[in-house]
Image: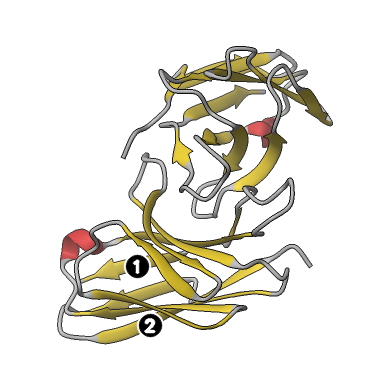
């Protein structure tokens, strides 16, 4: 199925640095979700966004639903070693009765 | 309780074996999903159950057979699998209705190896 364009594919950062990743689509999305997945585990929901322009925080994480409804970004401030993992964006193109579409993921490595 | 519980966590099976993966949630969610995930790839949808009825089958081979015995349980029956079916199998659930009906919660997954 269709996949979202997620970038960057991977990042290597120093502990304490801020991180930014984003997802874009050629189609309008009504919902954006951000997940984190640790090796051998299932994805964990971090933030859900439902309205264009919405900016939502969860601790050091902040995500925004783009005004055009075709993009979303996730920021992580003051990164720590446990932020290591793969971050996936996902979205629904209508009311939610269609399956989630996933981005290809951003692999984050934090150097202490 | 915000957990989706999957068993077993690891499974090794031969190509002639029959096995089942199990998934359980007690969040009152009425949509449940099976995903397959290969290494370094995003989850790939296999099946969707909505109100205990199969609503989406993403052209999955018949050697994978889903079952939803009730609103809390989801099974995936496996038979005559191939080595390329080795992957992490993820179960997820989400509410139906309401403003947060699209938030899918995932289980820990079953790491399946077909030998």
Q: Check disc 2: other Cα within 10 Å, few if <14, some if 14-19, many if 20+.
A: some
Residue A91 in the image: state x and y as whole percent.
53, 35
**Residue found 66% across the figure and 59% down from its top:** B95
Marked residue chain, label 2: B
Marked residue chain, label 1: B
Residue A31 in the image: state x and y as whole percent.
61, 34
Q: Are marks 1 and 2 in contact (CB under 8 Å)?
A: no
Total marks placed: 2
* Image quarter (top left, top right, bottom left or bottom right) of the N terminus of chain A: top left
Q: Nearer the viewer, mark 1 or mark 2?
A: 2
Q: In the rendered view, would you say A75 is above or below B87?
A: above
**Residue found 38% across the figure and 53% down from its top:** B45
- Choose between B114 and A103: the one closer to the eye: A103
Q: Check disc 1: other Cα within 10 Å, few if <14, some if 14-19, many if 20+.
A: some
* Image quarter (top left, top right, bottom left or bottom right) of the C terminus of chain A: top right
- A46 left or right of B70? right
Measure how far apart labels 1 and 2 are at the Cα level: 11 Å
- Choose between B52 and A16: the one closer to the eye: B52
**Residue found 46% across the figure and 22% down from its top:** A10
- Choose between B78 and A83: the one closer to the eye: B78
Helix, strand or loop at label 2? It is: strand
Query: Which numbered marker is on residue A69?
Result: none
Helix, strand or loop at label 1? It is: strand
Residue B112 in the image: state x and y as whole percent.
35, 67
Color style of the picture: secondary structure
Q: Which residue is mark 2?
A: B20
Q: Which residue is mark 1?
A: B112
In the rendered image, residues at marks 1 and 2 fall on the same chain: yes
**Residue found 44% across the figure and 31% down from its top:** A103
Name the residue at the right extreme. Answer: A59
Snapshot quadrant of residue A108: top right
Q: In the rendered view, would you say A76 is above or below B64?
A: above
């Amino acid at each position: 199925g269709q996949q979202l364009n997620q970038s960057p594919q991977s990042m290597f950062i120093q502990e304490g640095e801020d991180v930014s990743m984003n997802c874009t689509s050629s189609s309008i999305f009504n919902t954006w979700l951000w997940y984190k997945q640790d090796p051998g585990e299932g994805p964990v929901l971090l933030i859900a966004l439902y309205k264009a322009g919405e900016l939502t925080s969860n601790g050091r994480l902040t995500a925004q639903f783009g005004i055009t409804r075709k993009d979303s970004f996730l920021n992580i401030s003051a990164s720590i070693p446990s932020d290591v993992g793969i971050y996936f964006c996902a979205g629904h193109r209508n009311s939610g009765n269609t399956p989630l579409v996933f981005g290809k993921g951003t692999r984050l490595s934090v150097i202490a | 309780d915000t957990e989706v519980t999957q068993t077993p966590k690891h499974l090794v099976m031969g190509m002639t074996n029959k096995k089942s993966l199990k998934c359980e949630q007690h969040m009152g969610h009425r949509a449940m999903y099976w995903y397959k995930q290969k290494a370094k790839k995003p989850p790939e949808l296999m099946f969707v159950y909505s109100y205990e009825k199969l609503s989406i089958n993403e052209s999955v081979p018949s050697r994978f057979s889903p079952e939803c015995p009730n609103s809390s349980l989801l099974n995936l029956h496996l038979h005559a699998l191939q080595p390329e079916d080795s992957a992490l199998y993820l179960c997820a659930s989400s509410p139906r209705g309401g403003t947060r009906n699209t938030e899918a919660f995932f289980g820990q997954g079953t790491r399946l190896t077909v030998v």
